């Protein structure tokens, strides 16, 4: 009898992403905007700027200041989440900013600020990496000069297997969870975080798998930008 293929709780193969879609230019008021859906995750991004930075005395004479605000709406999870920014949201705002910054040519805009608002409408594991993917699209939509797009993807270990793109249950119950963001054309990693434990060879395998997933998402990023340009013609 052939060996039964390993299936995950949602029926995916170990190296399979959840179904996903991306759209650019979804908000009329913002300078740039984007949306990503990945499994049950649904995230909307609005970018404003470059615009004059306030308070002025905190502006930089060398470059634009990038501000990111990651926020989960109170109805984004099954358990109602308090509206006040949590420590997790404050930390993720910083982590996401640091993952995006290396791709942006901020030196072109001294004294300016760029604001990236991330609203998680529905959350289901891996929202930080999906926020990075969509934020980079919204920044491109705003016309911010970039060295490369940034794309995020997660991998981890569940039931002893290295798997791609953990859903919420896998994230909570798995042995390890790794978040990676990548500038694909430059092949530079801008975010690498891990929860749990992996042996060195498992870590390598998870990084390679997350990179592979990121490259698939990168193709969809390019496609979403192309569609946006066609719509504007
Ligand atoms: P990430 O979303 O980047 O994986 P975490 O590992 O911190 O970040 O969170 C994993 C998942 O747990 C989230 O995607 C979300 O589905 C859920 N979650 C996070 N914070 C809360 C919260 N305050 N209440 C309920 N669920 C939450």
Image (tube, helix red, strand yellow):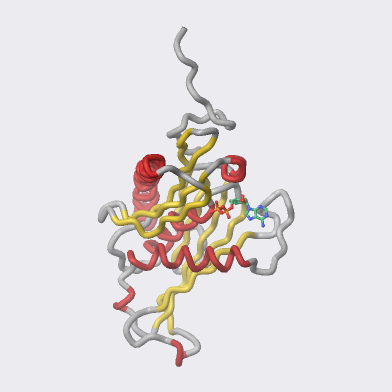
Where, quadrant-wise, is the C terminus in this rendering? bottom left
**Rendered view: 77 above or below 9:** below
Q: Where is residue 141 in the image (x, y as percent from the top left)?
A: 39, 62
Q: Could you tell me residue 17's position as x and y percent?
A: 46, 38
Q: Is residue 10 above or below residue 194?
A: above
Give the quarter of the image for residue 82. bottom right
Q: Report the residue at 73% width, 52% height from top.
A: 79
Q: Residue 137: image x %, image y %?
A: 41, 58
Label total for image: 0
Name the spot of residue 154 as percent of width and height, x first.
46, 47
Residue drawn at point x = 54 percent, y = 42 percent: 175
Q: In this view, does 185 lie to the left or right of 36?
A: left
Q: Nearer the viewer, residue 43 or 62?
A: 62
Image vertical order of residue 69 relative to residue 185, above or below: below
Residue situated furthest front in the rendering: 199
In this orientation, which residue lies closer to the viewer: 137 or 197?
A: 197
Looking at this rendering, what residue extends furthest in the top direction?
1
Query: Who's the residue at 60% across and 63% down the image?
Result: 88
Does residue 10 sit above or below 147 in this rendering?
A: above
41 displayed left or right of 178: right
The quarter of the displayed image where residue 52 is located: bottom left
Is residue 30 visible in the rendered image? The answer is no
**Residue 26 visible to an observer of this rendering:** yes
């Amino acid at each position: 009898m052939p060996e039964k293929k390993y299936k995950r709780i949602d029926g995916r193969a170990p190296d399979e992403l959840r179904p996903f879609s991306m759209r650019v230019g979804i908000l009329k008021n913002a300078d740039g905007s984007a949306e990503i859906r990945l499994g049950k995750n649904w995230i909307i991004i609005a970018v404003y700027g470059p615009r004059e930075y306030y308070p002025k005395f905190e502006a930089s004479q060398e470059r634009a200041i990038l501000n990111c605000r990651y926020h989960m709406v109170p109805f984004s999870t099954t358990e109602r989440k308090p509206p006040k920014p949590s420590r997790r949201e404050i930390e993720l705002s910083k982590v996401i900013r640091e993952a995006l910054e290396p791709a942006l040519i901020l030196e072109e805009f001294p004294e300016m600020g760029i604001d990236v608002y991330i609203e998680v409408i529905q959350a289901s594991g891996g929202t930080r990496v999906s926020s990075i993917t969509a934020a980079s699209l919204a920044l491109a939509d705003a016309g911010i000069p970039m060295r490369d797009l940034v794309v995020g993807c997660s991998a981890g270990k569940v039931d002893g297997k290295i798997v791609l793109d953990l859903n919420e249950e896998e994230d909570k119950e798995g042995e390890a969870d790794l978040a990676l963001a990548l500038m694909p054309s430059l092949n530079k990693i801008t975010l690498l975080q891990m929860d749990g434990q992996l042996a060195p060879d498992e870590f390598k395998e998870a990084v390679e798998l997350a990179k592979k997933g990121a490259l698939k998402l990168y193709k969809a990023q390019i496609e979403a930008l192309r569609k946006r340009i066609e719509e504007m013609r």
